[in-house]
């Protein structure tokens, strides 16, 4: 399993989900007007529980952690259930997605009412089938801190990759998740510690000699994401 001190290198990329609160859909005056969605994608200064290969720990996104990524103005999309291959519901680049640190991460999306997926999302949120929002993020080196026994983590700065309206995370209330393969490999080497990449390579190499390949338990780390992708290829 490794040493508990390895935990600090396992969460450079992650997804975090939060109950859908303070949300609203507003229809325009006519059928051709845009539909406005407003919600809170992430909360700050509120500890939540994350589970990884070492067990549980508490994590807090600190007030101000979103400021730099929002100021930088990089493109961010709004998806459903992190379906990055699907057509985004809205994006910052075309002006249909607005993000604000209030200090929580507030989302305002202007949605096309002529799209069937927009209608489906609106009704699923109102009916309670889609009941959380989630973010995909990268935490740059040195922008988080841990307590002495690695049971508490504080994220001081993050790079926002995407936001999603989701059914639920892997655990109730708030969770970690495994990023999509194409997004993981799209990241640059600067996003990871060398030791993290070395452990990933060692882990994948060990799987090649394993007689019986089984589906690994979700561990919500970069190493686990690589292991799960390798495992699926082996089974296929």
Image (spheres, helix red, strand yellow):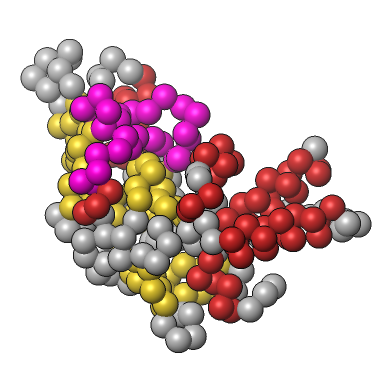
Magenta span includes 179: no
Q: Residue 113 appears at what percent x and percent y? A: 25, 19
Q: How many marks?
A: 0
Residue 154, percent from left and from top: 35, 71
- Residue 222 at x, y = what percent? 57, 56
Q: Is residue 192 above or below residue 120?
A: below
What stretch of residues is rendered in magenta? 70-96
Residue 63 percent coordinates (x, y): 21, 65
Q: Name which residue lies at 25% across and 43% down.
A: 72
Q: Which residue is at the far left?
A: 29
In the image, what residue occupies the spot 45% across and 40% down?
Answer: 82
Residue 52 seen by the camera: yes
Q: Is residue 39 visible?
A: no
Q: Say if 58 sits above or below 131 in the image.
A: below
Between residue 125 and residue 208, name the one nearer to us.
Answer: 208
Image quadrant of residue 19?
bottom left
Check the picture and name the quadrant holding the N terminus: bottom right
Q: Is residue 94 magenta?
A: yes
78 in relation to 3, above or below: above
Q: Report whether 184 appears left or right of 229.
A: left
Q: Main secondary structure of the magenta part?
A: loop
Front residue (pair 194, 76) = 194
Residue ID at (20%, 37%): 98
Quadrant, the C terminus: top right
157 sits left or right of 16 in the view: left
As drawn, the residue found furthest toward the right would be: 211
Horizontal relation, residue 139 to residue 6: left or right: left
At a point 73% along the width and 60% down the height, the residue shown is 203
């Amino acid at each position: 399993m490794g040493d508990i001190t390895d935990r600090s290198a396992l969460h450079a990329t992650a997804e975090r989900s939060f109950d859908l609160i303070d949300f609203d859909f507003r229809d325009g005056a006519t059928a051709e007007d845009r539909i406005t969605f407003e919600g809170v994608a992430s909360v700050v200064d509120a500890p939540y529980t994350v589970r990884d290969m070492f067990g549980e720990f508490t994590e807090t996104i600190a007030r101000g952690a979103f400021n730099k990524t929002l100021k930088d103005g990089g493109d961010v999309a709004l998806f459903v259930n992190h379906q990055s291959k699907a057509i985004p519901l809205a994006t910052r680049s075309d002006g249909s997605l607005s993000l604000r640190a209030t200090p929580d991460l507030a989302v305002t999306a202007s949605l096309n009412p002529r799209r069937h997926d927009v209608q489906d999302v609106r009704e699923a949120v109102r009916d309670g089938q889609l009941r959380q929002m989630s973010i995909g993020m990268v935490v740059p080196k040195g922008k988080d801190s841990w307590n002495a026994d690695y049971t508490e983590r504080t994220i001081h700065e993050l790079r926002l990759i995407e936001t999603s309206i989701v059914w639920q995370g892997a655990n109730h209330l708030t969770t970690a998740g495994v990023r999509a393969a194409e997004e993981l490999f799209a990241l640059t080497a600067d996003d990871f510690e060398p030791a993290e990449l070395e452990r990933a390579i060692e882990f994948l190499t060990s799987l090649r000699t394993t007689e019986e390949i089984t589906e690994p338990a979700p561990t919500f780390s970069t190493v686990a994401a690589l292991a799960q992708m390798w495992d699926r290829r082996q089974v296929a």
